[in-house]
Image (spheres, coloured by chain):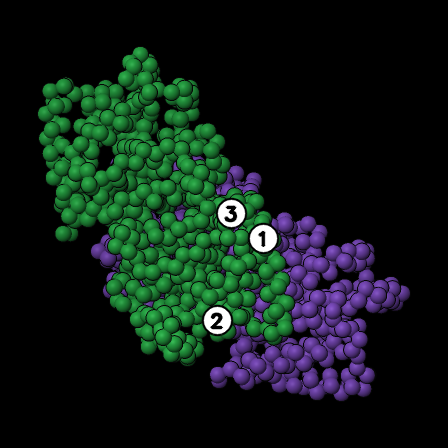
Chain colours: A green, B purple
């Protein structure tokens, strides 16, 4: 749509100078305010090869305190990165509060390149657009400022710049094969760029088109846009993000109080079945590895419900090179300073691997909710954000298995007392456990709400009655086996 | 993308019954709360022919107080409607505060139909998507709840229903030619529907997909989704919408204090030029009419600056069948109860016509801002909303000419005194004029901000120095002539 590609009008040189000084002054002031208000800023710089992206970033950062920005030039995804969800390499780069992250090319370039080469279907393209819109909105809702710049130059101008670069042996290497393709098939690439820009042009994370025919003018435009965006974001700073209606199909789930906890198995049955199930699991794990299916197993449950033993029973059967257990404690300062899902994105398994989470991202709607570690708006938004996160993982091809390990209040008391009495279990019980126990009823309300609102058809909760831990362990293994069989044998391979 | 078309799981009949009762009860309660909180609700029901859209709407409204809803079945756009911007027919239907509006089909059906028939280019499609996203976001920002339902049935099911309808002479007429096309080219239509749904699936105005294979189940899904959406919206009710960064290219404008007001013309020159310019204008107006270009001329300015005389001078030259003057006073109750741009949308000219606005939508950022008739968040958002509104008109093909009629404070005082002394002018001066005059400085700040922030390249402000009214009139005519010549002679016809 030619219509949307209208640019700012280039002023005279004199005026440009005055405006640059004004922009520098504003940028200086805003960065102080931004630090104070803990605003994280992600600047995405996309555009044509030789449009001057890197150069302009270089100029802008001269005006920023070096402790408070970082620049990344994203090349081809590495083998490691291709084995993670599409958004992974972008999510891991998001800045901390009060800091700038500049990305020299990002999702637009990656997608246009893949589409140009013909390696991306229309279906995958549509899915990517959905992922990006969701990613950007989640950042924005969490208080991030995302500034998206597209540097535009004409075919002729690009050709001229390439010739200039190629003429000099020192800069010749900078013209890549992809750059050359861009110029040779400029019109095709232009269409792909325009479509990708249009498809990711969201009101709150809009694209800013930069006329990059003149480098100095491009720099001024970028500076001014950055200033304007910071100004708006600083004004928005304390606004609550809206709650979004759920749009994911949910599975009806029982309330915790309705769960039957009487089930138990004998020691003999347990021993026999455990062995059989572990053998089966081992086999499936190997197949999984070869088929490169990623698996995410999430454990939540009451203190002393038996999560640790359950996880141990499960992982005993697995090849240690193919799984990892992530015990999740309270976040570190550098984790706290980012989007709360960041520390889970960075812990995602590679394709073919299993990641077991001992406590999870659901902390947001349990402990963080009840202890006031996040705002009401934050945890209320989280149900939807978590459903989106898990949908992203599901679309990537991951198997997601979520366990709630359930016991009653009396059983917990007995186990707590037992832990206190038994020296080798003593480390397992703390003051905090007793404090949490006092809030059992509040937790139960929160857990019920969580289970109702996040049991999507693609990632439902499984409740494990764990008064008899043996029973819970066998059940967990059976569920894992069933889910893995589904993906290994019912799919199209 | 098959992935996104996951539906809720149909429960057993017994459970369905219980859930329906629960939903009815919730709907009853929510409509009371919705009335109290003045929440306007637009329910868009889209989907396949014979999917049961009308029937389900009929069932839902049984649960709503008849004074508080309205249902519209949108057929083909009328000739009148095709001569207005694409969004016009939807914008005029938006509900008042505290009321429901149900649309039985809307923009999705209209677009898919046009695309299917091949009468819509890819470029126009992209532009429509942009318009819709903007329209929906503006409603949402203004506090509207938009619930979008898509009723899905399979090709086979649709065919069965059509056969059933056709078998009965009483219902035969209900199967339209477009319905038949849908079934014959189901896969093509499905692709078009899916793409349109994906392209307008915004986080805050998402699509809800309804499995309509069973009518009772479809009804329950729609009811539950409506309830869930109302619940979320009622929780969001008092949240401020975020400010959005400007993304439209702006023209640098002078501050009002820098405008030279000394220009004047002699009575002779005025008489001669006025005649010449009016003749030219008349000629252009005829051409405009034949070429079907719509023109919007907006007047703002200080009290007693000479807007009325200026407008009169302009319109004298025009064929009265081809223009309309809209004097804009404070909004009527039914206007106040809707989005503030509604009363301007409903006053838009048809193609080939000229609409002159004596005061405009800019009231939002002047009088409404200064008198507290809207919230700070409202007027701060308005710059962007107005730029979007005018962009929509520009993309439709309209010429937009905005005049600020400028005088100094002393000139106003003289004219006020003159009005008070002259009996035939006495009606023109009120207490309010004097009160506004006291706020001159505050107004000047607001006007300067307005002119800076809304002088887009496609709809810039023109400042008319009007201490000499004759000079201002000639200048206005010259500007109008130049703008019309641009569109009549420089474009591609």
**Residue A103 as seen in the image, left or right of residue B191:** right
Q: Residues within 10 Å of mark 2 (few under 14, many from 20)?
A: many
Circle 3 SS class: loop
Residue placed at 64% from the left, 78% from the top? B480
Circle 1 SS class: helix
**Residue B409 as seen in the image, left or right of residue A198:** right
Q: Vertical placement of B319 versus A196: above or below?
A: below
Residue placed at 64% from the left, 81% from the top? B481
- Circle 1 sits on which residue? A30
- Circle 2 sits on which residue? A212
Res A98 label: 3
Circle 2 SS class: loop
Compute the Cα span from label 2 to label 1.
25 Å
Q: Is residue B70 visible?
A: no
Dot placed on the residue nearer the N-terminal end, 2 or 3: 3
Please tell me which residue lies in front, B73 or A60.
A60
Compute the Cα span from label 1 to label 3.
11 Å
Residue placed at 41% from the left, 36% from the top? A331
Residue A115, given in percent of the width and then of the height, sits at 30, 65
**Residue A37 as seen in the image, left or right of residue A366:** right
The residue most toward the front is A170
Residue B418, given in percent of the width and then of the height, sits at 87, 67
The quadrant the N terminus of chain B occupies is bottom left
Compute the Cα span from label 2 to label 3.
29 Å
Contact between marks 1 and 3 (CB within 8 A): the answer is no
Dot placed on the residue nearer the N-terminal end, 1 or 3: 1
């Amino acid at each position: 749509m030619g219509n949307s590609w209208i640019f700012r009008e280039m002023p005279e040189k004199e005026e440009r100078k005055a405006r640059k000084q004004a922009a520098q002054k504003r940028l200086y002031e805003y960065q102080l305010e931004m630090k104070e208000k803990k605003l994280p800023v992600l600047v995405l710089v996309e555009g044509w090869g030789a449009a001057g992206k890197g150069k302009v970033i270089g100029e802008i950062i001269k005006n920023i305190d070096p402790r408070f920005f970082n620049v990344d030039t994203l090349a081809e995804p590495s083998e490691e990165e291709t084995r993670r969800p599409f958004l992974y390499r972008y999510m891991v780069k998001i800045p901390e509060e009060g800091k700038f992250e500049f990305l020299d090319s990002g999702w637009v370039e990656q997608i246009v390149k893949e589409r140009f080469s013909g390696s991306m279907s229309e279906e995958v393209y549509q899915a990517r657009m959905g992922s990006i819109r969701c990613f950007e909105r989640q950042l924005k809702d969490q208080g991030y400022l995302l500034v998206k710049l597209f540097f535009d130059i004409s075919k002729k101008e690009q050709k001229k710049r390439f010739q200039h670069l190629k003429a000099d042996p020192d800069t010749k290497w900078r013209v890549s094969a992809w750059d050359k393709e861009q110029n040779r098939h400029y019109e095709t690439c232009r269409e792909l760029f325009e479509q990708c820009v249009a498809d990711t042009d969201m009101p709150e994370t809009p694209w800013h088109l930069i006329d990059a025919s003149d480098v100095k003018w491009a720099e001024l435009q970028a500076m001014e846009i950055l200033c304007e965006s910071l100004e708006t974001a600083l004004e928005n700073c304390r606004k609550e993000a809206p709650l979004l209606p759920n749009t994911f199909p949910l599975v009806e789930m029982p309330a915790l109080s309705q769960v039957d906890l009487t089930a138990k198995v004998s020691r003999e049955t347990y021993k026999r079945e455990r062995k059989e199930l572990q053998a089966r699991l081992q086999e499936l794990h190997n197949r999984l590895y070869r088929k490169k299916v990623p698996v995410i197993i999430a454990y939540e449950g009451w203190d002393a419900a038996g999560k640790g033993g359950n996880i141990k029973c499960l992982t005993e059967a697995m090849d240690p090179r193919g799984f990892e257990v992530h015990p999740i404690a309270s976040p570190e300062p550098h984790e706290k300073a980012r989007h709360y899902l960041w520390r889970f994105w960075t812990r995602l398994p590679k394709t073919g691997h299993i990641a077991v989470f001992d406590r999870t991202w659901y902390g947001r709607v349990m402990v963080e909710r009840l202890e006031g570690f996040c705002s009401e708006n934050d945890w209320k938004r989280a149900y939807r954000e978590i459903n989106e996160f898990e949908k992203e993982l599901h679309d990537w091809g991951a198997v997601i298995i979520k366990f709630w390990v359930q016991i009653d209040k009396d059983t917990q008391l007995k186990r707590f007392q037992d832990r206190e009495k038994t020296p080798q279990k003593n480390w397992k019980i703390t003051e905090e456990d007793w404090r949490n126990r006092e809030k059992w009823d509040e937790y139960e309300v929160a857990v019920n709400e969580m289970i109702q609102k996040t049991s999507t058809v693609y990632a439902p909760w499984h409740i494990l009655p764990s008064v008899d831990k043996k029973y819970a362990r066998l059940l967990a293994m059976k569920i894992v086996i069933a889910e893995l069989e589904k993906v290994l044998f019912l799919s199209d391979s």
